[in-house]
Image (spheres, rainbow, N blue to C red):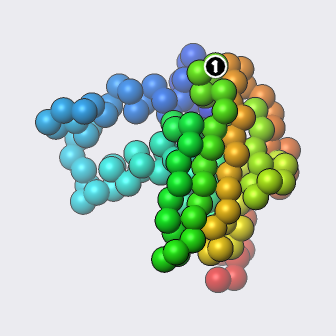
Amino acid sequence: MSVQDLGPNGAGITTLINIGFKDAPYGVPGNSDAGAMNSWLLWQMLGIYPVVTQPVYLISSPWFPDLNMTINGNQTLRITATGLDRGYYVQSVRINGQPWQKNWFEHQDLMEQGGSIEFELGPEMKAWETGSVPPSPGHTTM
């Protein structure tokens, strides 16, 4: 199941965040679990999510049209999303200017030297992720 499949109306993570998180006192559902809920929210809004025990990040849809992050001390990761005004479903992804068919990337692809992720978003679900599945825990040498 992908992030886009969650919920009866396909709204997925977007609906969960809009229902559970508020810009107000006590705006985090339950408690923050020592920052775990806040961290989860931030990663979801970036459109990428780290896989525990793996040097891998899953790709979902970002909430921002353009952002730059300083990573690894002095490198820049730029995440752009066109089509946010039309919808939040991923139509295509480019990593470092190259078409990307996997719904994940490895740490070394972007988080060491920096780079870019370009999202094209739209109103309908599309099977853009036709590449290989992410490695399973225990099948990656770190």
| Spot occupied by residue 97 in the image (x, y as percentages of width and height) | 80, 54
Residue tagged 1: 86
Q: Quadrant of the N terminus?
A: top right
**Dividing the picture into quarters, in which one does residue 29 lie?**
top left
| Spot occupied by residue 51 in the image (x, y as percentages of width and height) | 56, 61
In depth, the one of 100 and 52 nearer the eye is 100
Tag count: 1
Residue 131 relative to residue 78: left or right: right
Q: Quadrant of the C terminus?
A: bottom right
In depth, the one of 101 and 70 nearer the eye is 70
110 shown above or below 28: below
Residue 103 relative to residue 3: left or right: right
Point 51% across, 36% down: residue: 63
Point 85% across, 44% down: residue: 130
78 shown above or below 82: below
**Dividing the picture into quarters, in which one does residue 135 lie?**
bottom right
Point 16% across, 37% down: residue: 26
Residue 110 relative to residue 42: left or right: right
Q: From this viewpoint, is residue 36 visible?
A: yes
**Dividing the picture into quarters, in which one does residue 65 lie?**
top right
| Spot occupied by residue 98 in the image (x, y as percentages of width and height) | 84, 54
| Spot occupied by residue 14 in the image (x, y as percentages of width and height) | 48, 29
In depth, the one of 10 and 98 nearer the eye is 98
Q: Mark 1 is on which residue type?
A: Arg
Q: In the image as oriented, which residue stretches furthest toward the top?
A: 9
Residue 52 relative to residue 5: left or right: left
Q: From this viewpoint, is residue 60 visible?
A: no
- Mark 1 falls on what kind of element? loop
Point 80% across, 33% down: residue: 127
